[in-house]
Image (cartoon, rainbow, N blue to C red):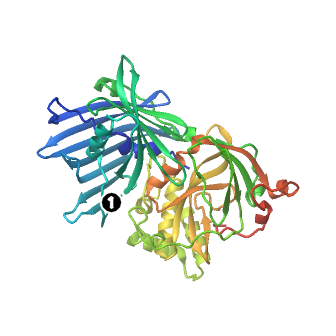
Amino acid sequence: MRSWIAPLLLVPMLCLAPGLLRADNSVPATQTTWMTVLLNGRKVGHEEIQRQQVGNTVVTTQTLVMDVERSRTTVPYTNISRSVETISGEPLSFSMNTTMSANDTKVDGVLLPNGDLQLTNTVGGDVRKSVTAWPGGALLVEGQRLAMLTAGQHRGLHYNLLVYNQASQQPMNLDVDVLGNERVSFPDHVETLTHQRETLRRSTGDQVVDLWLDAQGNLRKGSLSMLGQPLDLVACTESCADAPSQSVNMMGSATIDSPRLITPEMLGDFLSYRVRVTNKAAIKPFINTDEQNVVDLGNGEWQINVYRGMIDTEDPPTSADIQPNAWLQSDSPIIQRLADSAAGDSVNKMHVMGNLSKFVSRYLSQRGVDIGYASALEVARNRKGDCVEYAVLLAAMARAEDIPARVVVGMMYVERYGNKSRVFVPHAWVMAWVKGRWHSFDPAVERFDSGHIALETGDGNPWHFFNATNEFGSIQIHSVQTFADLYTMPSIGGQAGGGSGGGGSGGAK
């Protein structure tokens, strides 16, 4: 369980360069814009956007500063992104450096002469380089500014932007609508601004960002939703941006009430959840797995059946599920030694996964609330963290033993969290491909049970976590039913009782 900072990785998409132009359309040598960050009307941070013309290039640097509260401990968060482009908006290079307490991660990208992208990921001191094709036509900050400045002259225009997201290291295809000029109120004045709306189409649902720009292309306000609450960036003075901020208590906003007490006996068997999602843009906020069946009942209503036995419905792993990456460094000698030692002499992959899960459960000696988001290698070295750190280490160790593994992000039932009781909280665990199926393992709580509801799987990149858990503010659980509860009534969306068998999930016992 941890604090989730979903919108922080969306900032490069939202925070366009200030884009100030002189009357002769030239770019000032240096221009700085300050913005205050508001969550549901409360100031929670600030951002500095600096734009410089250096010769025939434009360099845009965006620095976001916030404090995140975790378990009553305040942890500083800083995200610095930098893009270098030609004055016509052609991408040349970029970087993003994220610091959360003692953890520092960095990605550097350089466009090569042949059009490829050279990526360098530095996570926990581990440096990994790769070369991939640059998505043709993808834009960075200055390219977005120029496109939006031109489009803003045409009210009612619908157009597309292909932008490169440094956090996910993937292109994003945005649908953009020019909504026209609007009067926007600021603390001490009112401005007439052009309203444009960016929509990112995702399989799970749409992510919408509203932007208000002035006649020169300056970003004056940006808004999106985080955990069901409005997150706003508003242009202001430097003193306004630097004014004291409140910390962001993400876990307090992310807990979801349970309609009933769920006993250990119930958690050890089949459970059926009736869930309502108030975000109308959510297309499919939950995923099907070999232990979870999701039924769309319409009008934002969902039924989620979670089984202790296997339902054997999901596709087999791909090559990416076995490979090392910047967050799951399964080729690291440290992780390989830990995995070999924990696996023992067993050749049975289920036994190996059980041994690995039990090892990770004991290996983390300290619950580290000052850990922002650690990679498997960092966890192997410092032995600190919470559910995500347990999950990334176990996934990396599984891959080191040639067992395909994915990190799952979702929610888990707990009887008490802080001053709340009977709630579901953000959580992470691991699915491993064993005996032709995906089996779940949860080293953070030493066993997987039907109190786990999966939202998304990923490769350990934090983007997957923050992206999935952004829906927590719109999820409501109306009912939790056992097989016995459903036995005397018609099932909804299929034969719910079929999952009542007592087969193990593969979690460490």
Instruction: Determine which quarter of the picture holds residue 305.
Output: bottom right
Determine the secondary structure under disc 1: loop
Q: Crowding at label 1, few (<14), some or many (≥20) Cα neighbours within 10 Å?
A: some
The answer to whether residue 453 is visible is: yes
Q: Exactly how many numbered labels are in the figure?
A: 1
Query: In terms of depth relative to the viewer, which is nearer, 382 or 5?
Result: 5
Residue 349 percent across, percent down from the top left: 58, 78
Q: Position of residue 316 (x, y in %)?
A: 56, 73
**Left or right: 107 with respect to 75?**
left
- Classify 478 as above or below 134: above
Quarter of the figure with residue 38: top left
From this viewpoint, is residue 5 visible?
no
Q: Which image quarter is the C terminus in?
A: bottom right
Most extreme residue toward the top is 188
Q: Is residue 363 left or right of residue 330?
A: right
Residue 332 x/y as whole percent: 38, 70
Q: Is residue 352 left or right of residue 492?
A: left
At 23% across and 51% down in the image, what residue appears? 90
Badge 1 is on which residue?
Answer: 135
Seen in the picture, residue 214 relative to 401 is either above or below; the reply is above
**Depth check, front residue: 213 or 277:** 213
Outermost residue toward the right in this view? 488
Percent x, y of residue 487 = 86, 58
Specify the amino acid type for callout 1.
Pro
Tell me the residue at 51%/47% (across/down). Answer: 206
Q: Residue at x 49, y 72 (%)?
A: 318
